[in-house]
Amino acid sequence: MASMDEHILKAAKEIVVKFIECGRLSPSGFAETFQSIYKTVDETVKARVSLPDKAREPASPGTGQKAPAGKR
């Protein structure tokens, strides 16, 4: 589980850094925003891990996800 927590931490950090780079967040707001983003990523990942195998299958084509582009 520690590895998953590390991945969650890194993902949350990258999201906050991108927000700062894009100008959507000032560095002074890092702490509050990081906590919020970390909690959201953590809850999302752990909810997904606890789902039964059937619920983890990718969505069928035509359900809003784009199909991979083919060669032209």
Image (tube, rainbow, N blue to C red):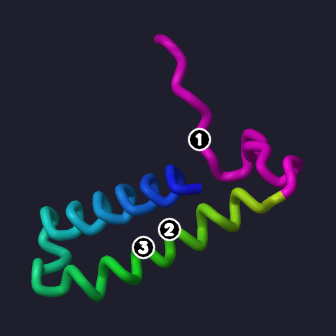
Q: Is residue 65 left or right of residue 59?
A: left
Above/below status of 34 relative to 7: below
Of helix, strand and loop, which mostly describes the magenta segment?
loop
- The residue positioned 12% from the left and 80% from the top of the image is 26
Q: Which residue is mark 2?
A: 41
Q: What amino acid type should be assigned to the residue bearing mark 2?
A: Val
Tell me which segment is drawn in magenta. 52-72
Quadrant of res 61: top right
Q: Earlier in the sequence, mark 3 or mark 1?
A: 3
x, y (%) of residue 62?
A: 73, 44
Mark 1 nearby-residue class (10 Å; few <14, some 14–19, many ≥20) = few
Q: How far separated are the C-alphas under marks 2 and 3?
A: 5 Å
Q: How far separated are the C-alphas under marks 3 and 1?
A: 27 Å
Q: Is residue 68 magenta?
A: yes
Q: Quadrant of the N terminus?
A: bottom right
Badge number at residue 19: none
Q: Nearer the viewer, residue 16 or 59?
A: 16
Mark 3 nearby-residue class (10 Å; few <14, some 14–19, many ≥20) = some
Q: What amino acid type should be assigned to the residue bearing mark 1?
A: Lys
x, y (%) of residue 46?
A: 64, 65
Q: Earlier in the sequence, mark 1 or mark 2?
A: 2
x, y (%) of residue 72?
A: 47, 11
Above/below status of 67 relative to 19: above
- The residue positioned 37% from the left and 82% from the top of the image is 35
Q: Is residue 57 left or right of residue 9?
A: right
Please name which of the two marks, 3 or 1, marks the residue nearer to the observer: 3
Above/below status of 55 relative to 60: below
Quadrant of res 47: bottom right
Q: Which residue is mark 1?
A: 66
Q: What amino acid type should be assigned to the residue bearing mark 3?
A: Tyr
Badge number at residue 38: 3
- The residue positioned 59% from the left and 73% from the top of the image is 43
